[in-house]
Amino acid sequence: MSAAKKDYKRITTKSVVEMKKNGEKIAMLTAYDYTMAKIIDNAGVDIILVGDSASNVMAGHETTLPITLDQMIYHASSVVRAIHRSLVVVDLPFGSYQGNSKNALDSSIRIMKESGGHAVKLEGGSEISESITRILTAGIPVMGHLGLTPQSIYKFGTYTVRAKEEEEAEKLMEDALLLEKLGCFALVLEKVPAKLAQKITENISIPVIGIGAGNGVDGQVLVTHDMLGMTHEFHPRFLRRYMDLYTEMTKAFENYIADVKSRDFPNDEEQY
Ligand code: KIV
């Protein structure tokens, strides 16, 4: 297992806040199904995010917008059945919380009740503060998400780095302070300059988990299928690939086809 400073039997929202205080980095990865979640949990990853990136990775959509609340609950419940240690955070999908705070609360309650997840994640700052407060009032932990927020892709127009200009950087800092004040237990910062991410991290007490936000934050998150090299059309600078599974899996499938066609598979030991 990892070089952890403290041996947590079970990761809670309190544990990750404690990790920040103790200077222990937080490792977070995505999962959308039972088998992958089991491997990730056993490896000792602190937080499993059932991200709405399932819309891209699992369903092949171009954006995260089409995935529904029912589909997120299906993915999250499969993940929850696999885990023993990790904290499971579930994305509220596009359209399930932007309407009003009642809509946000109802969607969060469905996620908690029907999937067994431990917390929800929402994209946005001051514009969704009422919804965050209402969800928190119901006792549901909330993780924020600022910077590049993929559910607003049609507003941004591109997936490029956010908050390079002073005005956007200031708004980002204000939103991060607001999310902390409202009571979020952690914050994801996506694709923002490393210096800005570090400044935000130093100015708030809740952990900041970065993706494309440099090394001055409290933890890192990657999309599992990207870090395993299963997706291979996508090459952002922040992505470190730990395997080339696309190539490895292609080789395995080609070998299988060849073995079937040549009648090599199954052999005498592989039959009854
Ligand atoms: O949906 C997702 O996978 C995410 C991460 C990229 C942070 O929100």
Image: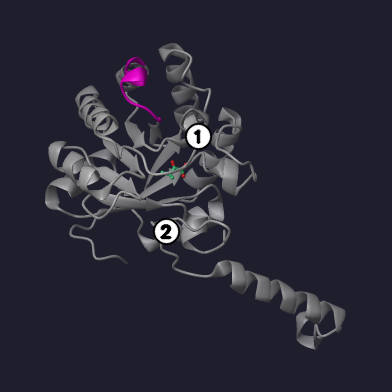
Q: Position of residue 241 (x, y in %)?
A: 45, 65
Amino acid on which disc 2 is placed: Leu
> What residue is pinned by disc 1?
157
Q: CA distance from mark 2 to mark 1?
A: 21 Å
Residue 130 appears at what percent x and percent y? 33, 15
Image label count: 2
Relative image position of residue 227 (x, y in whole percent): 46, 61
> What is the three-letter code of the residue carrying label 1?
Gly
Residue ID for mark 2:
239
The picture quadrant where one finds residue 149 is: top left
Magenta residue span? 122-130
Residue 127 part of the magenta segment: yes
Query: From where the camera sits, is residue 203 visible?
Result: yes
225 vs 160, nearest the viewer: 160
- Residue 250 lies, with reference to residue 181, above or below; the image says below
Give the quarter of the figure containing the N terminus: bottom left
Above or below for 2 versus 113: below
Disc 1 residue crowd, few under 14, some 14–19, many 20+, Cα 10 Å: few
Q: Quadrant of ligand 1?
A: top left
SS class of the residue under badge 2?
loop
Residue 13 appears left or right of 112:
left
Front tag of 2 and 1: 1
Name the secondary structure under disc 1. loop
Residue at the (51%, 38%) spot, across then down: 52
Q: Residues within 10 Å of mark 2 (few under 14, many from 20)?
A: some
Which of the two discs, 2 and 1, labels the residue nearer the N terminus? 1
Residue at position x 35%, y 59% from top? 44
